[in-house]
Image (cartoon, rainbow, N blue to C red):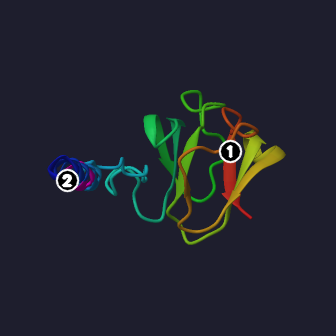
Amino acid sequence: MKPKRITMAGVLAGACLTGALAMTVATPASAAPADWRDCPANSVCVWDHSNYEGAFLAGGVNVSNVGGTMNDRTTSLWNRSGSRICFYQHSNYGGEVLAIVAPGESRPNIGAHANDRVSSWGTC
């Protein structure tokens, strides 16, 4: 009978240790938009990498051409304006609407269809 108690005590100790370890392991935080200073209030911001990293552009609610640095490079975005924003395939709000983003919405990854295709954005 004594060996059974030792085995049961070992099992209980192991279970407690496993539970304690599971509680101390940190889970990674979900990606959030970059620091507030990076994307000013009332702006629309785009990054060339997912999770708000890499080259970055902040603009108003209507940007007819993102310029050479960010043209066809957007992967993540944050709409800090109070307007709904449409992201377009070509400059001057032309071509396909690739994404429609609500006020305050952010996307750590714009998705395969729109990735690296944005050339302009505006209210819609």
Q: Which residue is mark 1?
A: 120
> Residue 9: which disc?
none
**Looking at the image, which residue is at 47% across and 48% down?**
58
**Residue 4 as seen in the image, left or right of residue 2:** right
Q: Which residue is mark 2?
A: 1
Label 1 SS: strand
> What percent of the width, then of the height, locates residue 105?
56, 63
Label 2 SS: loop
User: Magenta segment range?
Assistant: 12-16
Amino acid type assigned to the residue bearing label 1 in the image: Ser
Circles 2 and 1 in contact, beta carbons < 8 Å: no
Q: Residue furthest bottom?
A: 82
Q: Nearer the viewer, mark 2 or mark 1?
A: 2
Classify mark 2: residues with Cα within 10 Å, few (<14), some (14-19) or many (20+).
few
**Residue 73 as seen in the image, left or right of residue 3:** right
> What percent of the width, then of the height, locates residue 113?
76, 38
Classify mark 1: residues with Cα within 10 Å, few (<14), some (14-19) or many (20+).
many
Magenta portion: prevailing SS class: helix
**Looking at the image, which residue is at 39% across and 58% down?**
40
**Going from the N terminus, do you reach mark 2 or mark 1 first?**
2
Q: Residue furthest right?
A: 95
Q: Nearer the viewer, residue 30 or 11?
A: 11
> What percent of the width, then of the height, locates residue 15?
27, 53
Amino acid type assigned to the residue bearing label 2 in the image: Met
> What percent of the width, then of the height, locates residue 124?
74, 64
The vertical placement of 88 against 70, above or below, is below
**Looking at the image, which residue is at 47% across and 65% down?**
42
Q: Was residue 9 drawn as part of the magenta stretch in this picture?
A: no
Rounded to the nearest angstrom, the CA distance separating label 2 from label 1 is 77 Å
Q: Was residue 15 drawn as part of the magenta stretch in this picture?
A: yes
